[in-house]
Image (cartoon, rainbow, N blue to C red):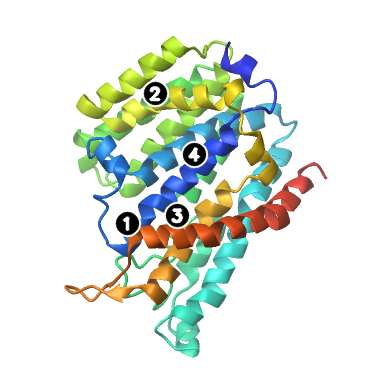
Amino acid sequence: MTINEAAIDRKNNLNIIRLVASLMVLYMHSFAVCVGVQDEDIFYTLTNHKDLAGGIAVYIFFIISGFLICRSFDRTSSVFKYAKARFLRIWPLLFVVVMVLAFIVGPIVSVYTFSQYFEYGDLKGFLLNLIFISTDTNLPGVFPNHYIHSVNGSLWTLMYEVIWYILVAITSIIWKKRRWFAPAMYVILAGIYFGITYGPLGSLPVLSSGYMLNMSKLGMFFTIGMTAYLYSDKIILSVRALGFAILGLVMGILFCNFIFTFSICGAYIIFYIAFQKRFIAKWYDKVGDLSYGIYIMTFPIQQILVEYLGKPSKTYHTLTMNPYLNMALTLAIVVPLSWLSWHFIERPCLKLKNK
């Protein structure tokens, strides 16, 4: 059957896929914050040293987001309702996390005194994450002896996510009538990505920034998700096509650019798994959608564990910790917190969408 036929109801595996992706981010960050190297990341080996678990997880988020956000706008009666729904999904928990980190965790953990933290420290960049115009994730005097000084290294992707929410609305006047617009955007973004990565565009001041590289790269995954939605009546889910997608992904890992290969072959694999009726994760849907909570709360928990359980490394005196112990303890903390977040913050806010 086609994606359109498979996605006609809410019975799918999208939530469990996002959960797995959020756990992949936790897995990758454990090596980054605990030992400062990521060679032990199994996905680094599986991708022939081309990407890490967390990077692949973010690509998965953007593929799914492109599909769901495009569908959301297409089915919403007004731009206001669309914006309200997006705001209620992403902002309430973000507000809680940012405020707790900035005004409770920061002053406690910082090497500065309480008064110095607020007098000399610059909180502006961190707080600007609340309006999605900053990727500053540091706080004054917090975690200076860690491999990574960031308080919440997962926040940087939210700005790009929101930019694409806005672009979906702005370009809707085109893609609602001309669905080829989404794959056209993909081609343009892929061209920019390759031009920056391998070609002359990387030498241009405007395009050589990390912002443009991230915008084009993440945009490729978002627009491929949009394309999957807009052509959902044409894309057939079959075992044969899945086999070709897996083969293409393997060949891409061995011989081609992984980003490009995963954006095509990986996207098909994700949607095949997502809309397989015989693999529906009903049990998880009853628990709640914990993926956003895990994604946004994991990093600071991992850093706090390193701060209080880590030991100075012999060479640089940087705090280090067994990454697998960090993983286990973080899971034990973040899963209950994410459950509480879903049931007492996220879901209650989502109920306000239709009011």
Among the two numbered marks 1 and 2 on one chain, the one whose residue lies closer to the N terminus: 1
Up the image or down, 266 lies above or below 205; here it is above
Instruction: Please say whether residue 207 is visible from this viewpoint.
Output: no
Give how far apart the Cα atoms at labels 1 and 4 are.
21 Å
Up the image or down, 281 lies above or below 176; here it is below
Q: Residues within 10 Å of mark 4 (few under 14, many from 20)?
A: many
Quick check: marks 1 and 4 in contact, CB under 8 Å?
no
Q: Residues within 10 Å of mark 3 (few under 14, many from 20)?
A: many
Q: Which residue is mark 3?
A: 154
Among the two numbered marks 4 and 2 on one chain, the one whose residue lies closer to the N terminus: 4
Disc 1 marks which amino acid?
A: Phe
Quick check: marks 4 and 3 in contact, CB under 8 Å?
no
Give how far apart the Cα atoms at labels 4 and 2 are.
14 Å
Secondary element type, mark 4: helix
Instruction: Please say whether residue 46 is visible from this viewpoint.
Output: yes
Image quarter in which the C terminus is found: top right
Among the two numbered marks 4 and 3 on one chain, the one whose residue lies closer to the N terminus: 4
| Mark number, residue 112 | none
Disc 2 marks which amino acid?
A: Ile
Quick check: marks 1 and 3 in contact, CB under 8 Å?
no
Q: Which residue is mark 2?
A: 264
Image quarter in which the N terminus is found: top right
